[in-house]
Image: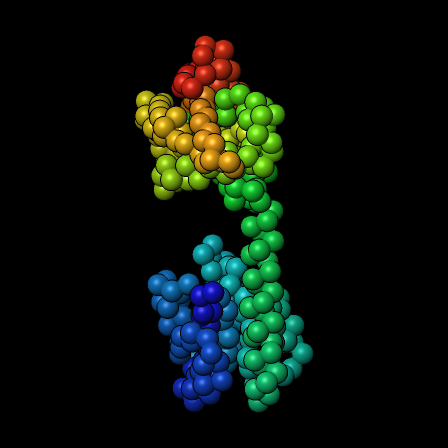
Amino acid sequence: MKNKTILIVDDTIVNLDILGELLKQYDVIDAISGEDAFDALENIKVDLILLDIMMPDMDGFEVCQKLKSNQTTKNIPIIFITAKTDEDSIEKAYDVGGIDYITKPFKPKELLARVRRELHLQELQAELKLLASTDSMTRLYNRRYFTKTSKHTLDLSKREKQNLSIIMLDIDKFKNVNDTYGHQVGDDVIITLANKLIEHQRKSDIICRYGGEEFVILLPNTSLENSEIVAQKIRKDIESLTIKIASNENLKFTISLGISQVDLEHENNIELALKRADNALYEAKETGRNKVCTKT
Ligand SMILES: [Mg+2]
């Protein structure tokens, strides 16, 4: 696993040296002021910040408040390390968003233990977040995450006045696959399709496993025509695919796809566009499968 990065902010060089030495198992970055810390954070992803309180210009409380009000830094845990031991300072440290408070002179082993605990908690949190937002079989986003993020994506599309298209797709005659080869093979087919969708994913596309064998792709800044090009590429790719299953048997499958676009002027969620994509998908099924249909 990638080594954790810790930013130490302290106006006293000796303190930076001592802490740096103590935390040498991690990647440590020094900052001698709040401004210095903000500069560092613009270029480097940091897992934890150790923050001094008494500094000239901007004190640690203010630095912390600034970091907590910034979208890209607000989730970085901050541990205050300070010579201030009065209760008001401790209370304030937590009020402004600090996660822990260590007083100087600190006990090295205790400090290390607290740092370790904080980094571990963070990992657990990240894992939970991933579990809550993804489908465990395919690692794609789950429906719950999709619903949540689609609102945000729609807002962005409205603001930027950019098209927002939707592809809904599912595996043709998937029940036959399960009935003929069993659910294990059925799962393999779903995972194979998911991986193909990821291969075709462009930077801002959001792919979701919407239901059993049903997937949805949200395509920001993409016209219907371009969505159709994307959809046809995926369809052809799947069509040409052969999956090896047990006893040297090969399996081929196809998918049907429905496309729609959100009416940015009149629609405030993607529900109707999803419905249109679903109708288009239904039409693709009804008119022969292994094809792409569009509903405007
Ligand atoms: Mg200081």
**Residue 188 shows in the view:** yes
State whether residue 266 is above or below residue 117. Answer: above
Q: x, y (%) of residue 142?
A: 56, 39
Residue furthest to the front in view is 247
Q: x, y (%) of residue 237?
A: 36, 30
Q: Relative to the observer, which residue lies in front, 9 or 254?
A: 254
Q: x, y (%) of residue 173?
A: 53, 21
Q: Relative to the observer, which residue lies in front, 175 or 95?
A: 175
Q: What's the residue at 47%, 35% (across, down)?
A: 248
Q: Relative to the observer, which residue lies in front, 244 or 130?
A: 244
**Residue 258 shows in the view:** no
Q: What's the residue at 45%, 85% (across, down)?
A: 21
Quadrant of the drawing holding the C terminus? top left
State whether residue 6 is above or below residue 145. Answer: below
Residue furthest to the top in view is 287
Q: Report whether 140 appears left or right of 159.
A: right
Q: x, y (%) of residue 107?
A: 60, 88
Q: Relative to the observer, which residue lies in front, 207 or 62?
A: 207
Q: How many dots with numbers?
A: 0
Q: What's the residue at 38%, 40% (across, down)?
A: 199
Q: Coloured how?
A: rainbow
State whether residue 184 is above or below residue 225. Answer: below
